[in-house]
Image (cartoon, grey):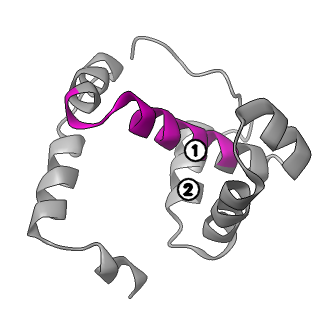
Amino acid sequence: MQLDKIRGERTDQLFKAILELKTVDECYAFFDDLCTISEVQSFAQRLDVAQMLKAKKTYDAIQHETGASTATISRIRRCVDYGSGGYNQILDRLYPDGTESTEPEQGK
């Protein structure tokens, strides 16, 4: 299985810790300690790119709006289309009615 490449005790601990977070503010505090600003911004950019791909935006529009390289957009496209389903699952949960806004909610 594709997920086996990242599976392990340390990864399990990390994911269990993330599942314990209750609010956006708790996420900010945890990820501020866990990651560099650049890493968090990169994660956010990748999710934004995936959302835009699902919304059928062009690579040019995505690159212009996010600053992501075409290589990054292409890699995320492969994940959205053929990956483990993580992007699609979370985007479907964030936007269950299909109205995928690029404006994040604050304070949750």
Q: How many marks?
A: 2
- Left/right placement of residue 14 relative to residue 67 reads left
Residue at screen point 20% across, 28% down: 33
| Residue nearest the observer in this picture, 51 or 6 | 6
Element at badge 1? helix
| Marks 1,2: beta carbons within 8 A | yes
Answer above or below: position of 104 versus 31: above
Type of secondary structure dominating the magenta stretch = helix
Answer above or below: position of 32 versus 107: below
Measuring from the top left, give residue 54's x and y in whole percent: 75, 52
Measuring from the top left, give residue 92's x and y in whole percent: 59, 48
Residue at screen point 64% across, 39% down: 48
Q: Amino acid at mark 1?
A: Leu
Task: Say which residue label 1 marks.
Answer: 47
Q: Which residues are magenta?
A: 33-49
| Residue nearest the observer in this picture, 53 or 74 | 74
